[in-house]
Amino acid sequence: MLASRRTILVFLVVAFILFNAYYLGHKKPQKSIPPLSDRQAQLWQSLHSLLEQHVPDCPPPILHRSAGIPRFDAINETPRKSYIANADKIRQPMQAAHDGFVHAIRNLKIDHAYVPGTMGIVSSAGGTYLPTFVVSLLLLRRTGSTLPVELFMKDRTEYEPSICEVILPPLGVKCVVLSDIMAGQGGTGIEGFQIKSVAMLFSSFEKFLWLDADCVPLHDPTSILNSEPFTSTGLVTWPDFWANTAAPVYFNISRQPEPLSTVRQATEAGMLLVSKETHFLTLILAIYYNYYGPDYYYPLLDQGAPGAGDKDTFLHAATALNESFYSVSETVVDLGNVTPWNSQTAINAGYIQADPIQDYNLTSQGKWRVGDPTVAKPPRAFFIHAGDPEFNPGKDLLGEKLVGFDGNPTRLWTHPPGAMKRLGYDAEKAFWEETTAVACNSQFAFESWKSKSRLCEDTRAHWKAVFLKPDGKVPEFTNG
Ligand SMILES: *[C@@H]1O[C@H](CO)[C@@H](O)[C@H](O)[C@H]1NC(C)=O
Ligand SMILES: *[C@@H]1O[C@H](CO)[C@@H](O)[C@H](O)[C@H]1NC(C)=O
Ligand SMILES: *[C@@H]1O[C@H](CO)[C@@H](O)[C@H](O)[C@H]1NC(C)=O
């Protein structure tokens, strides 16, 4: 009895020791995923060293003149022109650097630092663009969209605590400061156009809609993120007015065939749909083009055409890597007023871009309105890019475009009638309602408005004069 008890006791003690030895020996160290900000900083550290390693080893391209403003023509092919004076000198060294970078990123094993399965909207705004962004955001929320928004700022000088911490979080917006992620790693030289591609890289979303601060969806953009052409391509771009004017030598450098001038327009990158699941490399190559943009790739990709900058880096990065994309084909249209001496053409006061789902529906049936507008009715307008003027009363909104040729306050957008009918509703009225709401609420204490006065009064006065006038002429917003 005693013996067996002792045996059991010894057995239990031995079992306990063996179990502990086994358990401790096999227990893996507790593995926790580091915070996203650390993963992003790590990503930038790796990427920054690759960017630096593959600097073009030659003087920058020299433009001997500008490509000017060639309108896109879908019918008549025009040979691509070169305005680069030193093309022969830069071809080989820039190609070697491009080859090296593409090879390096194809072999890069790196944490992509985003949250799988997420979807949202990415934008950037600081300083005088912040009020514009907030008006655009309120208009986005009017569409019923609940998509989360990440708003990027260059550095702490652009971060406005009262806006970022009080106003924006309940509206579903998180402010992200780029220099916090890129600290000490060459992030301080990132300026202007370059911010866009880097902001896309550091957004936490897997799939996103990029929106410039002055770009407003007229409908909930969730639908376009969940449908063709985005679901199968992973990259959707919208067209500019202009022909693509990339230099022939760029296509040698990036080892891709030269597209015909009739294939598609240059890009207007106020809005883009991007999937980081499928187009992470495209995004990284676009960052390369932007990192070496001001000196090297901007002059190569546009040769001085209007809006030179980041706009054409995304699509060219995709074609250089042979990755898929859909470029919306429906022509971008200026909205504005006409002058007494030209009743045909609107003076640009913003422009509209088409619904990509409806555009794709037509082109996939072989109906290319861009070559022959009679083949089908146009897709509805999906975005207004309201950049001239921006809806920011602290900037140029209350300027000369609001006074008609009869000297009275006027709507900004009345022409052309066909484009007005694609809006579907009185978008300008909605723009003014949100602008007044922001201008007349003292909580919206933007830094750039501190030196301004009468913003509320002047905005409201225009609103009353134009939209509350019983005899005010209202354009048609639908096809009846
Ligand atoms: C550059 O590319 C063009 C067309 O893609 C080709 O015709 C030309 O031979 C190339 N030039 C060089 C020097 O590789
Ligand atoms: C590009 O991709 C297409 C299909 O995605 C493929 O058929 C083609 O061979 C690729 N071209 C190159 C040069 O990799
Ligand atoms: C295009 O739209 C029509 C009419 O709404 C629809 O029947 C058709 O399935 C659509 N086609 C594509 C390719 O989306």
Image (tube, helix red, strand yellow):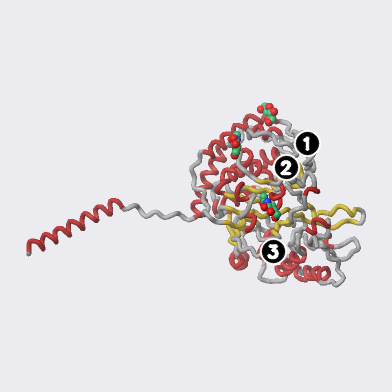
Determine crowd level at label 1: few under 14, some 14-19, many 20+ residues with C-alpha closer than 10 A: few
Amino acid type at mark 1: Glu
Residues under numbered marks 2 and 3 in contact, where contact means CB atoms less than 8 Å apart: no
- Residue located beneath label 2 in the image: 264
* Of the two numbered discs 3 and 1 in the rendering, the one whose residue sits closer to the viewer: 1
Q: Nearer the viewer, residue 193 or 358?
A: 358
Dot 1 falls on a residue whose secondary structure is: loop
Q: Nearer the viewer, residue 367 or 63?
A: 367
Real-space CA distance between mark 1 and mark 2, rounded to the nearest whole angstrom? 11 Å
Mark seen at residue 430: none
Residue name at image x 66 percent, y 30 percent: 91
Quarter of the figure that contains the C terminus = bottom right
- Tell me: residue 98, above or below residue 121: above
Mark seen at residue 139: 3
Give left or right: position of 211 versus 429: left
Q: Find the residue positioned furthest to the right.
A: 341
Earlier in the chain: of badge 2 and badge 3, it is 3
Dot 3 falls on a residue whose secondary structure is: helix
Mark seen at residue 77: 1
Dot 2 falls on a residue whose secondary structure is: loop
Determine crowd level at label 2: few under 14, some 14-19, many 20+ residues with C-alpha closer than 10 A: many
Quarter of image, ligand 1: top right
Earlier in the chain: of badge 1 and badge 2, it is 1
